[in-house]
Amino acid sequence: MKRERLSWALGWASMGCGLTELTFPEHIGRVLGAPRHSGLLRSLGLRDVANGLGLLLQPHRREWVWARIVGDALDLALLAVTFRLPRANKVWQGALTLGAIGVALVDLYAATKWSAPLLRSGAVTPSLGMDVGSSGPLESWRGSGLAEDVGVNEQRGEESEPEELRQRRMDEAARALGLPKLDEHGTRQ
């Protein structure tokens, strides 16, 4: 399933669950044996609506899926507490718990499906155009002042510093940036 479709489906599922919790909190509370906790159910509904809107409006942000997983854990913990309540409808509790487990598994699937490509693409660490398969020139940062801006104390004045000293400072800056070492022809060593 494509990422956009999965995000769309999770977003609408969140909206549906959230609107149900906002519309019928007393009925849900009665089924779970906690009729006085309609305020808590409304807040859970608001959380689901917010997650749903986030997934629908920003389908490429995986933070919304992780927010759903945290919400699933909270929902399952609260459902576990309701099993001790004497007035709860055990059949409906079991059905709601199985549904919450199923939703949690789908959310975990979505989170792992989204995490893998992002880690492989190099999106976690910023690239300076120095990747092995990069089409950018390896020396694009040299001469731009970038190396001088990385903690190299350049003496300002009329006199120009010797080329050897300048090259040594450039090499130190390249090491500080973690850039590849280049030979005199501009190729990697």
Image (cartoon, rainbow, N blue to C red):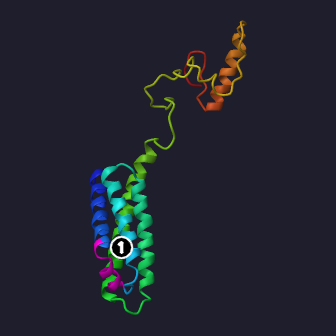
Q: Which residue is drawn at 44% across and 45% down?
A: 120
Left-right relation of 179 to 49 = right
* Percent x, y of residue 107: 37, 63
Quadrant hosting residue 90: bottom left
Query: Closest to the observer: 88 or 146?
Result: 88
Q: In terms of secondary structure, where does tag 1 sit?
A: helix
Q: Which residue is at the front of the view, 185 or 24?
A: 24
Q: Specify the segment rendered in magenta.
A: 23-32
Which quadrant is home to the C terminus? Answer: top right
Residue extending farthest to the top is 158
Q: Where is residue 47 in the image (x, y as percent from the top left)?
A: 39, 64
In this orientation, which residue lies closer to the viewer: 29 or 71? 29
Q: In this view, does 142 lie above or below 132?
A: above
Residue at mark 1: 100
Judge from the rendering whether residue 158 lies leftward or rightward of residue 20; answer left or right. Answer: right
* In the image, residue 58 lies in the stretch drawn in magenta: no
- Residue at 44% x, 70% y is 73
* Residue in view at x 58 percent, y 28 percent: 180
Quadrant location, the N terminus: bottom left
Residue 8, percent from left and from top: 28, 55
120 lies above or below 87: above
Which three-letter amino acid code belongs to the residue tagged 1? Ala
The spot of residue 175 in percent (x, y) is: 65, 29
Crowding at dot 1, Cα within 10 Å, few <14 / some 14-19 / many 20+, comes out as: some
Q: In which quarter of the image is residue 96?
A: bottom left
Residue 69 appears left or right of 162: left
The majority secondary structure of the magenta stretch comes to: helix
Residue 172's place in the image compared with 84, above or below, is: above
Q: Give 177 or 96, whichever is nearer the viewer.
A: 96
What residue do we see at 40% from left, 93% from top? 86
